[in-house]
């Protein structure tokens, strides 16, 4: 089990790194666009040619934010750092809470798997329709790829949590129930 956990931890480290890089890219593109537009206004006041901007900013930032959010949500599930409320379960015995945590993890895995199945179907439809983004003409399939990856990672995270909680190799955390 420790080998599996080690491989999965590395996989989620890669996902966290990609999420970080994606959000940094979105911020960098946005800041670059603001600076270019400001420079264009200043140059226009001096008689220069206005109209500087980052081409396809909306397309690129949407893709970057979609990537960052989809992967970061899966990483949060894996690390147990997602939002949780234990108002109803905090007074229960540890064994009962552990059982509920396993059931909750399996339920989360089932829900993520359903979303993954539906998402793959939608992505296949985008392949057939060849829908493109408005500005740069990026295939909508590329917007589905990070969502599908995030959902697949969420299924893995939830199943691993269920197994580890069942075996008692994962300490109970606030987010488990």
Image (cartoon, rainbow, N blue to C red):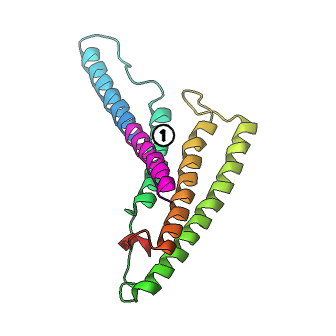
Quick one: label 1, few (<14), some, or many (20+) residues within 10 Å?
few
Which range is magenta?
Answer: 1-22
Residue on which the image places disc 1: 62
Residue drawn at the location 58% of the way across and 65% of the way down: 109
Instruction: Tell me if residue 11 is in the magenta stretch.
Output: yes
Quarter occupied by residue 49:
top left
Based on the displayed image, in which of its 4 quarters is residue 137 positioned? top right
- Furthest residue to the right? 128
Where is residue 112 drawn, in percent x and y? 58, 61
Tell me which residue sits at (43%, 53%) in the image: 75
Is residue 14 shown left or right of residue 144?
left
Residue closest to the eye, 150 or 124: 150
Q: Residue 107: x, y in percent?
A: 58, 71
The vertical placement of 46 against 24, above or below, is: above
How many numbered discs? Answer: 1
Q: Position of residue 13 (x, y in %)?
A: 41, 46
Which quadrant of the rendered structure holds the C terminus?
bottom left
Above or below residue 140? Residue 170 is below
Answer above or below: position of 91 versus 155: below
Residue drawn at x 43%, y 72% as measured from the top left: 176
Q: Main secondary structure of the magenta part?
A: helix
User: For the point 72% across and 43% down, which residue is it?
Assistant: 124
Viewer-proximal residue among 133 and 91: 91
* Residue 141 highlighted magenta (yes or no): no
Q: Position of residue 32 (x, y in %)?
A: 33, 27
Helix or strand or loop: what does disc 1 sit on? helix
Q: Nearer the viewer, residue 102 or 175?
A: 102
């Amino acid at each position: 089990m420790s080998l599996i956990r080690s491989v999965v931890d590395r996989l989620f480290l890669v996902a966290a790194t990609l999420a970080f890089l994606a959000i940094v890219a979105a911020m960098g593109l946005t800041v670059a666009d603001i600076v270019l537009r400001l420079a264009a206004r200043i140059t226009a006041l001096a008689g220069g040619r206005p109209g500087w901007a980052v081409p396809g900013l909306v397309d690129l930032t949407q893709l970057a934010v979609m990537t960052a959010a989809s992967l970061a949500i899966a990483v949060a599930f894996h690390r147990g750092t997602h939002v949780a409320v234990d108002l109803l379960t905090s007074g229960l015995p540890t064994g009962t809470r552990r059982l509920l945590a396993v059931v909750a993890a399996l339920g989360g895995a089932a829900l993520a798997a359903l979303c993954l199945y539906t998402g793959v179907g939608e992505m296949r439809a985008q392949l057939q329709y060849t829908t493109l983004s408005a500005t740069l003409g990026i295939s909508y399939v590329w917007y589905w790829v990070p969502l599908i990856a995030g959902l697949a990672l969420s299924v893995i995270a939830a199943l691993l949590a269920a197994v580890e909680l069942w075996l008692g190799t994962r300490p109970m955390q606030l987010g488990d129930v």
